[in-house]
Amino acid sequence: MDKTRPIEITEAEYADLNENCGGFCMECREPAYGVEPDARRYRCDSCGAFAVFGAEELLIRGLIEFSCESPR
C-alpha cells in the first residue's frame, strides 16, 4: 500500500476527527479514535500496524486532502 497517498476527506469529517481525537492508520487507511492530534505511529486496532497518526499530524505532513464529497 502506498503510505504517502493522501487520505481524502471533507472538511466536516476533518472537524469531526479533531473534536473526537481521531486520525487514520496509514497502513490500512481505517479511521482511528482516541489518539492525540499529534499522534505518530500508534498501534492500529484494525490491522495491528504501528501506523496511526493524528488528524493534525496528517494535515501538517500533507497526508490529508480535502474533497467536496466523502469518498467513504
Image: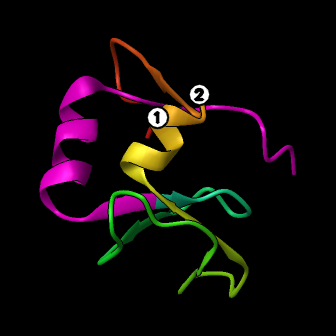
Is residue 21 part of the magenta span, yes or no?
yes
- Quick one: SS at disc 1? helix
Above or below, comparing residue 3 to residue 71 in the picture: below
Residue 37 lies left or right of residue 52; in this view the side is left
- Residue at 87% x, 51% y is 1
Q: Is residue 20 above or below residue 16?
A: below
Classify 38 as above or below 55: below
Q: Residue furthest top?
A: 68
| In this rendering, position of residue 34 left or right of residue 72 | left
The type of colouring in the image is rainbow
Residue underneath mark 1: 59
Dividing the picture into quarters, in which one does residue 42 lie? bottom right
Task: Check whether the beta carbons of the residues at disc 2 and disc 1 lie within 8 A of each other.
Answer: yes
Toward the viewer: 5 or 69? 5
- Determine the CA span between mark 2 and mark 1: 5 Å
The residue at the point 17 percent across, 48 percent down is 16
Write the start and end of the magenta stretch as one range.
Answer: 1-23
Percent x, y for residue 19? Answer: 12, 54
Looking at the rendered image, the quarter that the C terminus falls into is top left
The dot on residue 62 is 2
Residue found at x 25% / y 39%? 13
> Residue 17 in the image: x percent, y percent?
26, 52
Tell me which amino acid carries mark 1. Answer: Leu
Specify the amino acid type for callout 2: Gly
Mark sitting on residue 43: none
> In terms of secondary structure, where does tag 2 sit?
loop
Task: Describe residue 1's horizontal placement relative to residue 8 as left or right.
Answer: right
